[in-house]
Image (cartoon, rainbow, N blue to C red):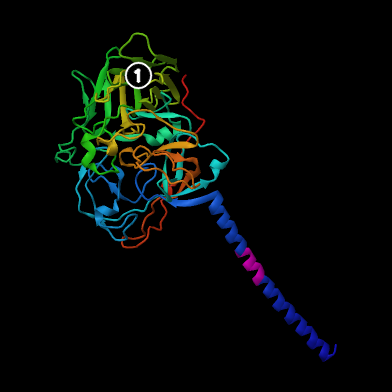
């Protein structure tokens, strides 16, 4: 090959390399532009990330908050951070530590003093499935993101309570639609149980007068001549050794422990004492049978009625009301024998006019009815009662008491203002929805809106107290970044993920609690 031909070949190769590099650069830009467009389309029409700015949905979803662990009993809880109380602009999360606020442990009642310097945790970051409501109808109990009707440039997040054409009313903390109580799907109900007392968390200095403004004492007390005992070396256990024919009781005393008011550990404690009572309760414990004869059960008082649910060790689950001879419900189960005397979980709940008794994998449910008076004449001023009773020989562990969410009917939970659906039914028209916050005393929602919504169609304003269909953004799906942790104390960002708190956000479901 001549030198001239060799030179031409080298020039051709060089030229092709330049063209290839140019094509690679062009392809890279094309892919970047395509990826950007796809990401933009995905964000605009499929899924978008949002950050929770306030505590109106706590504890389901948390805004900026303090992480507290009770210095007396060790129970962990969160307390909402409110920027204006620290002379900070709205929706601000300080990088440096700030003075803590007075808070109350939701289990032992210890009042944590203010003043120590603590970090502020960021609000939860969630994924929202957008445009889902273009194809599927919203369901009651969905957690939805929507545009605030009075300020459409601001996104809100609340729980969907009522649908178009329905008449909604809040009666003693429960939701009624067209005059019938609405029960929460099981997974939503599980999220809504709030601790009143957990016997596993007991204070190390019970003699100080800082537990509900008095010294701490065991709130489960024995009735006269009761055989229940608490061992000094194992104070979290209750033991019984009695005749199978006698019934001994432990009564929960609210003058010693937390009461049943609609308190939130997340909120300012100054309004706690005047909050309404919540009478939907659940007791949970584990029982270890040492003999094959006897019984174990729970009694819950609501208004002037007393509901009992118990397990006879000879193989029967029973639910009764007011000591009536004829049980409301019974179920035959495997009798307790020497071969199956194992540690077994027991639960008894009175919630949304349902009585639910669980013993291990066995469940017995009784429906009291869906009308307002079906659980008894409504008397919200009567404090509910809790009793654990049993006979035979056994030990109870992990005893805990919970209350249900209670939707308040006055502003801030204890005010005099009456809102939409709080003192009378509120009828929704076509394409109108009604939403409430899970942190009911601390939520600005449909109950309290006073301004008409700004229409985005140039027509008449939207009605006061509703969310129009046009302003539904999407359904909250997943907490992908709960408030994380700082790698060390003075690091400005919480970059360590809180994996244990990553979770699905449960909403409306076809699953429901079924009676036996």
Is 257 contained in the magenta span? no
Is 26 contained in the magenta span? yes
310 lies above or below 162: above
Residue 269 versus residue 168: which sits nearer the camera? 168
Residue 413 versus residue 264: which sits nearer the camera? 413
Quarter that holds the N terminus: bottom right
Q: Which region shows up in magenta?
A: 25-32
Residue at the spot 23% in from the left edge and 38% down from the top edge = 272
**Could one spot residue 13 in this view of the protein?**
yes
Indicate left or right for 174 with 85 as reference.
right
417 lies above or below 459: above
Residue 113 % position (x, y): 19, 48
Residue 455 % position (x, y): 46, 46
> Residue 162 lies in what quarter of the image?
top left
- Which residue is the site of mark 1? 373
Residue 28 versus residue 47: which sits nearer the camera? 47
339 lies above or below 213: above
516 lies above or below 417: above
């Amino acid at each position: 090959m001549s030198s001239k031909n060799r030179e031409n070949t080298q020039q051709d190769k060089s030229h092709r390399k330049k063209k290839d590099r140019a094509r690679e650069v062009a392809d890279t830009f094309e892919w970047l532009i395509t990826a950007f467009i796809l990401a933009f389309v995905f964000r605009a029409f499929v899924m978008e990330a949002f950050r929770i700015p306030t505590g109106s949905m706590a504890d389901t979803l948390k805004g900026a908050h303090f992480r507290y662990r009770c210095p007396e009993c060790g129970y962990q809880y969160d307390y909402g951070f409110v920027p204006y109380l620290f002379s900070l602009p709205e929706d601000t999360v300080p990088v440096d530590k700030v003075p803590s606020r007075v808070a109350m442990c939701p289990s032992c009642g210890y009042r944590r003093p203010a003043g120590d310097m603590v970090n502020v945790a960021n609000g939860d970051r969630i994924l929202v499935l957008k445009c889902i409501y273009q194809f599927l109808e919203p369901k009651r109990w969905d957690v939805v993101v929507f545009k605030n009707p009075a300020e459409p440039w601001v996104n809100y997040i609340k729980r969907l309570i009522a649908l178009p054409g329905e008449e909604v009313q809040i009666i003693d903390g429960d939701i009624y639609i067209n005059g019938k109580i609405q029960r929460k799907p099981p997974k939503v109900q599980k999220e809504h149980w709030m601790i009143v007392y957990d016997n596993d968390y007991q204070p190390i200095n019970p003699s100080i007068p800082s537990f509900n403004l008095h010294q701490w004492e065991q709130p489960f007390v024995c009735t006269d001549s009761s055989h229940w005992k608490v061992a000094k070396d194992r104070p979290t256990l209750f033991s019984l050794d009695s005749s199978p024919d006698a019934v001994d009781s432990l009564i929960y005393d609210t003058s010693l422990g937390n009461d049943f008011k609609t308190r939130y550990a997340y909120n300012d404690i100054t309004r706690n004492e005047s909050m309404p009572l919540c009478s939907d309760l659940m007791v949970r414990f584990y029982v270890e049978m040492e003999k094959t004869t006897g019984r174990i059960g729970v009694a819950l008082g609501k208004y002037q009625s007393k509901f009992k649910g118990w397990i006879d060790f000879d193989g029967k689950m029973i639910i009764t009301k007011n000591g009536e001879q004829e049980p409301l419900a019974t179920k035959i189960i495997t009798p307790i024998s020497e071969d199956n005397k194992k540690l077994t979980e027991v639960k008894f709940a009175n919630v949304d006019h349902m009585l639910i008794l669980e013993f291990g994998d066995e469940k017995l449910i009784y429906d009291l009815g869906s009308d307002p008076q079906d659980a008894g004449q409504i008397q919200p001023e009567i404090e509910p009662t809790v009793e654990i009773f049993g006979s035979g020989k056994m030990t109870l562990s992990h005893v805990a008491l919970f209350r249900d969410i209670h939707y308040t009917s006055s502003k801030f939970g204890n005010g005099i203002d009456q809102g939409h659906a709080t003192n009378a039914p509120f009828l929704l028209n076509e394409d109108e929805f009604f939403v409430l916050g899970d942190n009911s005393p601390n939520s600005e929602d449909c109950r309290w809106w006073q301004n008409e919504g700004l229409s985005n169609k140039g027509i008449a304003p939207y009605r006061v107290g509703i969310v129009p269909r046009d302003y539904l953004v999407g359904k909250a799906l997943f907490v992908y970044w709960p408030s994380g942790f700082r790698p060390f104390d003075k690091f400005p960002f919480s970059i360590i993920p809180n994996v244990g708190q990553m979770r699905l956000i449960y909403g409306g479901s076809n699953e429901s609690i079924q009676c036996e």
